[in-house]
Amino acid sequence: MFQDETYGAVEEKECVDDTIVCKDCGREFVFSASEQEFYAEKGFTNEPQRCRDCRNARKAQRGQAPTRQMFDATCANCGKECKVPFEPHDDRPVYCSECFQNRNN
């Protein structure tokens, strides 16, 4: 069952397997007749644009914070090597987590 764009009416159409090119990886995948029926039952009007692997990868990425770039630094207090989430400059001191916490207490 799909919406007829010309008249806006809903009509029964026989679903047949359709081959679609994934917009992420460029591989072809089959949008099966049963998947089309499922989409129609749920009221989805657009075909999928991504293959199952790319859809799953995209779902897995959702909700994850992007990886933050870390920079190497030397603590101005204890001299220990550390990593900080900003690019250190010579005009300002950088502290390791432990010394930073001790300075603020």
Image (cartoon, helix red, strand yellow):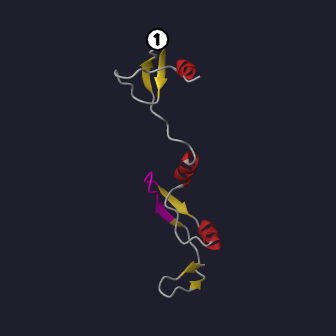
Residue 54 at x, y percent in the picture: 52, 51
Residue 23 at x, y percent in the picture: 44, 57
* 16 inside magenta stretch: no
In the figure, is residue 94 to the left or right of 64? left
In the figure, is residue 21 to the left or right of 9? left
- Crowding near pointer 1: few (<14 within 10 Å), some, many (20+)? few
Residue 9 at x, y percent in the picture: 56, 86
Q: Secondary structure at mark 1?
A: loop
Q: Quadrant of the C terminus?
A: top right
Instruction: Please determine whether, in this image, residue 74 is positioned above or below residue 12.
Output: above
The residue that appears at 49% across and 11% down in the rendered structure is 78
The residue sitting at the top extreme is: 79
**Residue span colored magenta:** 19-27
The residue that appears at 52% across and 55% down in the rendered structure is 51
Pointer 1 residue: 79
Instruction: Please determine whether, in this image, residue 100 is positioned above or below residue 32.
Output: above
The residue that appears at 45% across and 32% down in the rendered structure is 69
